[in-house]
Image (cartoon, grey):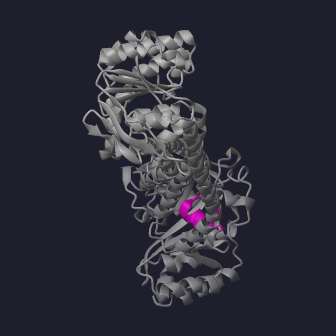
């Protein structure tokens, strides 16, 4: 009859008390562990998607929204900005900017976002081409690993996009078949969930439809030669006068009265019939793409920037954009911290709740041991007469507390990981973000130590009392 | 075998109790008679090392109990003294066999299932080996308690009012069993009681 077996038998002799204590303990541990898991995974996703991006430039509106839409692809964009206004930042010779990636958002294929961007998008997320090649022409696309798997897309497959960011068959762009030419390796970042294509593809798909509404026809029919010409003039600007250039262009833009493309306003069902007037673009599909800086009257959604280093000029750049242009510049780290602090209130409340439950479960271990020992006083005295030392009784009771703590911990961990798996399913269908219930954290090891400590402390007083059993007195009273 | 010299004990705020010197040779069976409140149980606890005497000494075999302290005293008691109490209590979460095994283990001895089976067989309890102790009748409980006191083959068996809760038949059966088992084990037996029914069983008597 080992001490462990004796303790175990003592506990299982009162199954209902044991059940109550274990349930409370498991709830406390489970809630804490669930918070740890969710927090860790959310943070990891956000962190991974920060991808070293220092600044995001987009249309004015909520900076958090701009960041969420452009970097995490979980919110609607704030609107579009004219390519002309963003061009200075796309200049590869810019003195402060290391990488500038333009994004053109607004379409999806069965809920997975289509992002018009340049190939250096992959550098941001350290994404590697798994199969196939980079897109080189209009309507060619490269699909993220998760999107490819979920949409069952393979190299050579074709699909038609829909307008908007959520699945809606009424908004399909008919007559534009995207072709899959490459599939990315998994990165664990937002890149996994996206369908990448050239910005020209997005423009192309929308131009044909937009033109038919007549609203933007004038802007869209600008001859390509003219755009190219403008660009050459633009290049002649002094490289250090970007702000000036930018202001100039913004003003020019306003004077032209050019409006942001309001895609929502278009009637896409009717809009795709007549392509006759735009053959000059339509027949271009297989032609090599021009650099996007050679286009003029186009819109993009945002630009992701990596700086060569943070300094006073980069700070000024952000302030300048925000104060002097129709665009805004947002810092991802600041906005994400703001998001954390907003979510943090709820997480704090849950954390307190978990701690209270843990305290109550510790108390319930204490009470159950204490009252069970009062019933077992005679047993304890008896054990002393049979040769048990006070230390042995102490160990027996402490062991009972520890067994409860370990079992409660194991149940709690099962509970939290089970809940996380269910939650992961929900998160996946809601946000297309993959979470996992199968990840175990180092913090959970600390949680085990904490649980053991709680079990020990709760058992300490009953154990001391047991070890101090006055044999003679107890036996005489019985 | 069992000797006391000028033994006395005082509870807090009470007159000290003095006990007559006892000298029981190995293997003899004695009856210690006394009325309630005469200090019988106190004496038995002193003899079993459950209480420590204020004055005087208790010797079991060659060992002076007052020379032992703490865990050593517990172990000595577990291995050398078997005690049968007035009401038989057991560790409720364990069955009969496990209770006997616990008595072996707590005394620092390995579990000896053959010994347990043989003992229960002799006490006509083999069919209750796996029973919960609260499912036994009072007579069966008292026999199981005797089995537990004997399981480590102690040199000394102390019985505290072993028959007071029993009817005449059970009382004489238990008394006979104690004598018989003590004899079989070669153990010294001291029964402490106020139960006059037992007087006829024991020729050696001490009156408090």
Q: Is residue A160 visible?
A: no
Residue A100: say if magenta: no
Residue range highlighted in magenta: A65-78
Q: Residue A453 location in percent, x, y?
A: 46, 53
Q: Residue B57 appears in which quarter of the rendering? A: top left
Residue closest to the eye, A110 or A18: A18
Q: Residue A327 location in percent, x, y?
A: 63, 78
| Vertical order, A469 against B96 (above or below) | below
Q: Quadrant of the N terminus of chain B?
A: top left
Q: Is residue A11 visible?
A: yes
Q: Residue A255 location in percent, x, y?
A: 70, 83
Residue closest to the eye, A347 or A126: A347
Residue closest to the eye, A27 or A61: A27
Q: Residue A248 location in percent, x, y?
A: 60, 87
Residue A67: say if magenta: yes
| Vertical order, A322 against A303 (above or below) | below
Q: Residue A206 appears in which quarter of the rendering? A: bottom right
């Amino acid at each position: 009859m080992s001490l462990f077996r004796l303790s175990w038998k003592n506990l299982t002799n009162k199954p209902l008390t044991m059940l109550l204590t274990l349930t409370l303990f498991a709830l406390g541990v489970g809630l804490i562990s669930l918070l740890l898991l969710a927090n860790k995974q959310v943070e990891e996703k956000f962190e991974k998607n920060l991808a070293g991006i220092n600044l995001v430039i987009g249309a004015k509106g909520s900076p958090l929204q701009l960041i969420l839409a452009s970097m995490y692809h979980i919110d609607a964009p704030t609107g579009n900005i004219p390519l002309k206004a963003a061009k200075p930042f796309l200049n590869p010779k810019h003195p402060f900017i290391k990488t500038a990636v333009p994004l053109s958002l607004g379409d999806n294929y069965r809920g997975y976002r289509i992002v018009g961007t340049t190939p250096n998008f992959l550098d941001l997320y350290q994404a590697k081409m798994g199969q196939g090649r980079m897109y080189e022409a209009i309507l060619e696309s490269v699909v993220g690993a998760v999107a490819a798997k979920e949409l069952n897309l393979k190299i050579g497959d074709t699909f038609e996009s829909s307008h908007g960011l959520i699945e809606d068959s009424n908004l399909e762009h008919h007559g534009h078949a995207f072709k899959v030419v490459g599939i990315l390796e998994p990165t664990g970042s937002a890149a996994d969930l996206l369908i990448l294509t050239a910005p020209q593809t997005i423009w192309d798909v929308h131009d044909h439809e937009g033109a038919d509404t007549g609203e933007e026809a004038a802007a869209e029919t600008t001859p390509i030669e003219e755009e190219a010409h403008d660009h050459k003039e633009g290049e002649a600007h002094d490289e250090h006068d970007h702000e000036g250039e930018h202001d100039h262009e913004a003003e020019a833009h306003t004077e032209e009265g050019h409006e942001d493309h309001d895609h929502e306003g278009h009637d896409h069902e009717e809009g795709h019939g007549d392509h006759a007037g735009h053959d000059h673009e339509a027949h271009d599909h297989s032609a090599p793409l021009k650099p996007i800086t050679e286009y003029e009257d186009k819109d993009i959604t945002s630009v992701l920037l990596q700086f060569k280093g943070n300094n006073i000029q980069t700070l000024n750049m952000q302030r300048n954009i925000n104060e002097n242009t129709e665009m805004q510049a947002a810092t991802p780290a600041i906005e994400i911290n703001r998001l954390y602090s907003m979510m943090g209130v709820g997480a704090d409340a849950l954390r307190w709740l978990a701690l209270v439950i843990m305290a109550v479960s510790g108390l319930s271990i204490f009470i159950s041991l204490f009252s069970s020992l009062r019933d077992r006083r005679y047993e304890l005295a008896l054990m002393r007469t049979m040769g048990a030392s006070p230390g042995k009784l102490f160990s027996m009771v402490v062991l009972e507390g520890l067994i409860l703590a370990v079992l409660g911990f194991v149940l709690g961990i099962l509970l939290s990981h089970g809940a996380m798996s269910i939650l992961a399913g929900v998160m996946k269908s809601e946000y297309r973000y993959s979470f996992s219930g199968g990840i175990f954290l180092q913090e959970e090891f600390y949680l085990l130590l904490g649980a053991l400590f709680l079990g020990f402390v709760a058992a300490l007083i009953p154990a001391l009392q047991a070890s101090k059993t006055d044999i003679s007195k107890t036996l005489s009273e019985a | 075998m069992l000797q006391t010299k000028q033994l006395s004990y005082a509870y807090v705020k009470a007159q000290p109790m003095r006990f007559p010197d006892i000298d029981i040779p190995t293997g003899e069976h004695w009856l210690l008679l006394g009325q309630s409140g005469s200090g019988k149980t106190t004496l038995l606890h002193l003899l079993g090392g459950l209480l420590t005497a204020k004055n005087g000494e208790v010797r079991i075999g060659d060992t002076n109990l007052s020379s032992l302290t703490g865990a050593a005293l517990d172990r000595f008691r577990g291995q050398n003294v078997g005690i049968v109490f007035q009401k038989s209590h057991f560790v409720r979460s364990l069955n009969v066999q496990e209770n006997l095994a616990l008595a072996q283990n707590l005394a620092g001895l390995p579990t000896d299932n053959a010994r347990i089976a043989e003992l229960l067989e002799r006490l006509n309890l083999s069919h209750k080996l796996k029973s919960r102790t609260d499912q036994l009748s009072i007579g069966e409980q008292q026999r199981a308690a005797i089995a537990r006191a004997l399981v480590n083959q102690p040199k000394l068996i102390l019985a505290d009012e072993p028959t007071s809760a029993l009817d005449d038949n059970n009382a004489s059966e238990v008394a006979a069993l104690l004598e018989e088992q003590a004899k079989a084990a070669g153990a010294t037996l001291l029964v402490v009681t106020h139960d006059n029914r037992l007087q006829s069983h024991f020729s050696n008597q001490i009156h408090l």
